[in-house]
Image (cartoon, rainbow, N blue to C red):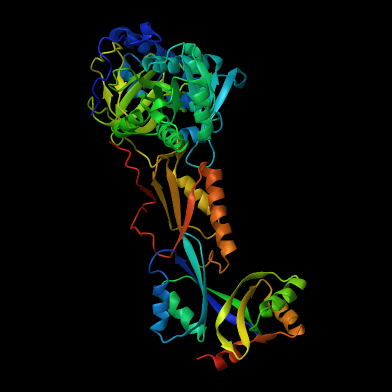
């Protein structure tokens, strides 16, 4: 269920772009329709879309109402992979200002291009949810997200700058150093994954610091699924207000939606994204408030005009008014996936990547199991591999080298560190039909 | 001159050592000596038994992964420096010992050690040349119970 309004009574709701965020519904829908038509026109510059649109005899003229978005084709991760590396660009390569990437189901990342205009839009979108969740120009924000191909670090960084606040770009990792910097520079805001916020609290205690006495007052957390229980935990341990935000690199990165002070779900920036919530089997819209797969059309993206991108994320949509005064559609937390993607310490991981890594080490498949747990605050992955004659040696150094080699391949293909546990033959459960390869013990759904 | 050693993969958790030992005991196979190498997650059990072919068959049928390795048994004087002397010979010949363990029985004033070499044939040559006694399978079986 949605959390109740926790905003202190009488407090104003700050907004970054009040006109856009409180636009009357009818007006916004007219804007969306106009932008959708323009986006279909722009999509024609991408051979992938042009072929489908021509084949179905579709064009901007086919879009008479927003419901007509359903006449347009879907775009999937597989389509992106088939267009590797930048086949979905609608602009000449020289117009790109940035390229980010996200992990695919194999070792190759899928790339996403941005024009200078896209980067401006993206900064604005991040500024919107940051301000909605309490960021003020006079504040300092510590960014403990990874800076790199991953969109989290740079997206938030530019959003904070846009607001006029100061950024401390510490990036992910080295928790003791994070805390020393926090102590020295007194940032009011922390940006990281929710599980890393708990690690920071744990590490503070190890260092003899009281986590509740740390300078931070507000946290903007994203990049991985979390629960209301985790929010309470973080808020209690660090004595802060914790806000959720949502986005994905295929669309733009963080900034698709984010919470306001009322915390009645994440406000979707509808002037830039047309979001559908569909039954993943029938691909028909689900009734309002019911869980379904989010399908997103990026209405203003210049470099990659993503049409009906199937996110595989399961969430609910709400249209009822929010006390903050914003008129946008809101979404719940992501409560699941329609595919088998796992998010490990903020990194997207597909079981098929682990399998690919194992295939690189002779004799380690077909029997393996991926166990994901969160023993403390951080995700841990154990890959259990059944031993068999081809890989067994009487020498311990060889056995340890085998474990290290598997671990290295997993790091290369999937980008995560995994513990490799060799197990006895036939100790992994056998299945008739599709094997169960993942045991997720984190309990990440509310 | 070489002995056949059986190695088994075991997970490092309670009861995992007992199971294979019971399986071969049920077939009346006695263990002459053994060694266990372990990490927090798993262990490698190495066994010297009289009828290694039968033991291997029994263990494999029961589902264990069994590896067969040739090792070398050497007797050294059971007194201070006895082993050090043998090791010096190996070191001088640049022979690397992968691992070693002791035999549970003594013979007179000699202790018997099991060595795992990358190149057992060369090791036997070196040890024999230097006057150490390499105990072969038949000889070993003649004095153990």
Q: Position of residue A377 (x, y in %)?
A: 40, 39
Give me the residue at 28% from left, 18% from top.
Answer: A262
Classify A187 as above or below A425.
above
Q: Position of residue A301 (x, y in %)?
A: 47, 18
**Residue A321: quarter of image:** top left
Classify B35 as above or below A428.
below
Q: Position of residue B21 (x, y in %)?
A: 42, 77
* Residue A57 visible somewhere in the drawing: no
Give me the residue at 28% from left, 34% from top.
Answer: A282
**Residue A16: quarter of image:** top left
Give me the residue at 55% from left, 49% from top.
Answer: A409
* Residue A205 visible somewhere in the drawing: yes
Query: Which quadrant, please, contains the N terminus of chain A?
Result: top left
View extreme (bottom): residue? B142
Query: Which quadrant, please, contains the C terminus of chain A?
Result: top left
Q: Closest to the observer: A223 or A359?
A: A223
Q: What is the total number of numbered labels drawn onto the structure image?
A: 0
Q: Please give left or right for residue A273 compared with residue B131 in the image.
A: left
């Amino acid at each position: 269920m949605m959390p109740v309004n926790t905003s202190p009574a009488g407090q104003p709701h700050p907004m970054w772009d009040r006109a856009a965020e409180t636009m009357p519904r009818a007006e916004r829908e007219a804007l969306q329709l106009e932008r959708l038509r323009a986006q279909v026109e722009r999509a024609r510059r991408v051979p992938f879309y042009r072929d489908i649109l021509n084949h179905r005899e579709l064009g901007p003229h086919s879009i008479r109402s927003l419901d007509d978005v359903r006449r347009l084709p879907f775009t999937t991760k597989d389509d992106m992979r088939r267009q590797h590396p930048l086949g979905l660009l609608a602009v000449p390569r020289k117009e790109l200002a940035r390229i980010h990437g996200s992990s695919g189901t194999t070792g190759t990342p899928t790339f996403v291009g941005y024009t200078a205009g896209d980067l401006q839009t993206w900064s604005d979108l991040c500024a919107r949810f940051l301000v909605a969740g309490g960021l003020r120009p006079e504040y300092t924000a510590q960014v403990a997200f990874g800076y790199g191909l991953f969109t989290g670090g740079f997206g938030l960084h530019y959003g904070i700058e846009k607001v006029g606040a100061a950024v401390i770009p510490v990036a992910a990792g080295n928790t003791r150093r994070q805390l020393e910097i926090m102590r020295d520079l007194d940032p009011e805001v922390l940006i990281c994954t929710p599980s890393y916020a708990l690690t920071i609290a744990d590490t503070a205690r190890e260092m003899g610091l009281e986590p509740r006495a740390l300078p931070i007052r507000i946290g903007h957390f994203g990049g991985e699924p979390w629960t209301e229980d985790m929010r309470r935990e973080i808020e209690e341990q660090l004595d802060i207000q914790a806000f959720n935000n949502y986005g994905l690199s295929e669309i733009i990165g963080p900034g698709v939606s984010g919470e306001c002070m009322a915390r009645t779900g994440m406000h979707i920036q509808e002037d830039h994204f047309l979001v559908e919530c569909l039954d993943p089997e029938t691909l028909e819209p689900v009734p309002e408030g019911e869980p379904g797969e989010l399908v997103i059309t990026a209405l203003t993206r210049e470099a990659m005009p993503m049409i009906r991108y199937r996110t595989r994320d399961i969430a609910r949509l709400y249209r009822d008014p929010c006390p903050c005064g914003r008129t946008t559609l809101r979404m719940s937390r992501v409560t699941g996936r329609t595919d088998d993607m796992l998010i490990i310490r903020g990194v997207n991981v597909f079981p098929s990547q682990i399998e690919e890594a194992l295939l690189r080490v002779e004799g380690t498949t077909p029997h393996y199991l991926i166990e994901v747990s969160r023993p403390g605050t951080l995700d841990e992955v154990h890959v259990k591999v059944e031993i068999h004659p081809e890989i067994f040696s009487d020498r311990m150094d060889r056995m340890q080298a085998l474990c290290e080699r598997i671990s290295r391949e997993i790091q290369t293909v999937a980008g995560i560190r995994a513990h490799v546990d060799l197990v006895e033959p036939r100790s992994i459960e056998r299945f008739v039909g599709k094997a169960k390869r993942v045991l997720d013990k984190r309990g990440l759904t509310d | 001159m070489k002995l056949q050693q059986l190695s088994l993969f075991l997970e490092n958790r309670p009861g995992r050592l007992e199971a294979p030992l019971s399986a071969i005991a049920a077939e009346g196979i006695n263990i002459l000596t053994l060694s266990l190498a372990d990490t927090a997650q798993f262990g490698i059990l190495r066994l010297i038994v009289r009828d290694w072919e039968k033991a291997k068959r029994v263990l494999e049928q029961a589902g264990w992964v069994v590896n067969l390795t040739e090792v070398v048994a050497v007797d050294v004087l059971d007194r201070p420096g006895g082993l050090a002397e043998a090791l010096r010979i190996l070191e001088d010949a640049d022979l690397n010992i992968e691992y070693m363990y002791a035999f549970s029985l003594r013979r007179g004033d000699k202790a018997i050690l099991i060595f795992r070499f990358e190149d057992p044939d060369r090791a036997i040559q070196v040890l024999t040349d230097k006057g150490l006694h390499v105990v072969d399978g038949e000889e070993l079986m003649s004095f153990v119970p």
